[in-house]
Image: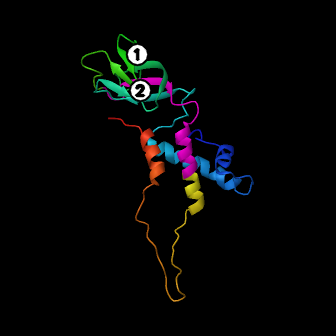
Amino acid sequence: MGLNLTTRADYKAYVGIKSTTQDAVIDALIPRVSDFVKNYCKRTFVDNWDTARVETFDGGFDRLILAENPVRAISTVQYSIDFGQTFTTLTQYTDYVIDGYTVRSTLSSGFPYLLRGYKVTYTGGYEDTPQDLELAIFDLMSYYLKNDSAVHSQKLPSPNTTQIQYINDSQLPAHIKRVLDSYQADYT
């Protein structure tokens, strides 16, 4: 799903690992944790810093909310009356203005509803993963490495019993969840 949000060298420096015995496991975990964080936060953070992202919208509102923020630069804002087959470029400050991570219409009617009628091409996100987010990623990786994705029990089963433990809590550790929630995209 794009670029990784951290590197093996950065993770190993954070946790103080000097050996190479866990390198393969760490290398396998980094893209999975990166994808999890991107899906959870509904944004990619670093994928569109210098690679243009194209988003299409149906309109019907006074603004188009972009997924990647902060917005670095908007190349074009276009509209289509033929369901996205052909597009006409709108003019900044005449047809729209940029307001943070939204494109606002200058018309009192906003962007009229047009199925696949608006296309925004832009760059945004971060050049490097924000430090607090990377720290949460390190802690999430450590959490997965320590728990090795297995169900652990405090009690040892006797030879004549079978023990099944059900996990009924799917919450992230609180300190990780706080950071991820602060970066979660809000499209309202």
In this view of the protein, which residue sits in the foreground, 76 or 66?
66
- Amino acid marked by disc 2: Tyr
- Amino acid marked by disc 1: Thr
In the image, residue 2 lies at what x, y percent?
57, 39
The quarter of the picture where the C terminus appears is: top left
In the image, residue 156 lies at what x, y percent?
53, 80
In the image, residue 187 lies at what x, y percent?
35, 35
182 is higher (above) or lower (below) than 175: above
Furthest-bottom residue in this view: 160
Furthest-right residue in this view: 19
Look at mark 1 in the image and give the residue it sits on. Answer: 88
Q: Calculate the distance from the C-alpha at mark 2 to the C-alpha at mark 1.
A: 22 Å
Q: How packed is label 1: few (under 14 Cα within 10 Å), some, or many (20 or more)?
A: few
The residue located at (51%, 78%) in the rendering is 155
144 is higher (above) or lower (below) than 51: below
The magenta region covers 114-139
Q: How packed is label 2: few (under 14 Cα within 10 Å), some, or many (20 or more)?
A: some
Q: Secondary structure at mark 2?
A: loop
The residue located at (53%, 46%) in the rendering is 136
Does 156 sit left or right of 18 as displayed?
Answer: left
Look at mark 2 in the image and give the residue it sits on. Answer: 101
Q: Judge whether residue 148 can be spotted in this image.
A: no
Furthest-left residue in this view: 109
The residue located at (43%, 33%) in the rendering is 67
Specify whether residue 124 is painted magenta. Answer: yes
